[in-house]
Amino acid sequence: MTRSQYLLRFLAVLIVSVVSAFAHAGETLRVLAWPGYADADLVKVFEQRTGAKVEVTLIDTDEALWQKASQNKGRDFDVFAVNTAELQRYIAQSLVVPIATDEMHNLSTQLLEFRNLTAIPGLVHGGQAFAIPYTYAEMGLIYDRKQVKEVPTSIQVLWDPRYRGKVLLYNGGSHNFALAAQAVGLKKPFQLAAKDWPGVAQQLIALRRNALTFYTQPEESVELFLRQGAALMFANYGSQQVALLKPRLSISPKTAIVNPSGEPRVFGCF
């Protein structure tokens, strides 16, 4: 799977749930989102432009998203952010409704790759769009160049026995199964067949042996990475985590710093 295919598959999209999400003055728009998807500055601008109030509920795993979005048959929220792989079960369970794209007049201002909904697998079913592209996630690795001598070129480095107890992992079941599926060479890591599960499960057990600990929030991941001396981190939040690391390091990625133990460390990412 190429990098572009991987990013596209984890495209984050804004979904209209089982109730109308068009907000008007005096109304409240209930948003279920991930960290960084509905920041206070964006909410403030939206409220000023529409006169509506926005209530944002944050989640940090796909499991938490499913629990909140599916309870009460989806009626507790108007829109929510989900990746294209996870979106399919919401559609299958009738927890989302088609979007009236002809009533959304700013679609022409989107990124070019977002404008053709049929070109993005999983968004259109039965000729109806169930999601509007909002952003995409840059997932990868952040590593300590003092401990990792060679630039990693594959996600399989997370299983390298040299980093036993040194890998910081994201606490998300579906994402970790997808990682394990890629590591064993499955061509469709987001669509596991029944025969694939035993091998993927064993691969996850092997990954657990390398785990330092697990994180859910981007800020938490940065704190753990810096304080606990991780060699590698699976960067589920991608560029958000890189942005959070930069001011903490106050250096370029090629400059050595001193960590709390007094050992010089150099950081990089890909």
Image (cartoon, grey):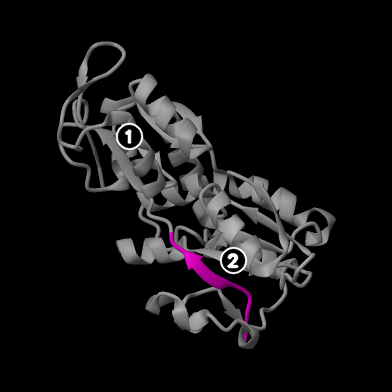
Q: Quadrant of residue 113?
A: bottom left
Check disc 2 and report the residue beneath it: 14
Residue 154 is situated, as x and y percent measured from the top left of the image, at: 27, 48
Image spot of residue 125 (x, y percent): 62, 81
Main secondary structure found in the magenta portion: strand
Q: Is 146 left or right of 211, judged from the image as shown? A: left
The part of the chain drawn in magenta is 127-136
35 lies left or right of 144: right
Q: Secondary structure at mark 2?
A: strand
Q: Which residue is found at the position 42% from the left and 48% from the top?
A: 179
Circles 1 and 2, Cβ within 8 Å, touching? The answer is no
Is residue 239 one of those drawn in magenta?
no
- Residue 256 visible to an observer of this rendering: yes
At mark 1, the secondary structure is: helix
The residues tagged by marks 1 and 2 sit, at their Cα atoms, a distance apart of: 30 Å
Frontmost residue, 216 versus 179: 216
What is the x, y in percent for residue 34?
Answer: 57, 50
**Which residue is at a point 20% across and 37% down the rendered structure image?**
253
Report the quarter where the N terminus lies: bottom left
Counting labels gives 2
Task: Say which amino acid is labelled 1.
Answer: Pro
Q: Which residue is mark 1?
A: 247
Question: Residue 183: x and y, percent?
Answer: 36, 48
Q: Is residue 128 magenta?
A: yes
Q: Nearer the viewer, mark 1 or mark 2?
A: 1
Amino acid type indicated by mark 2: Leu
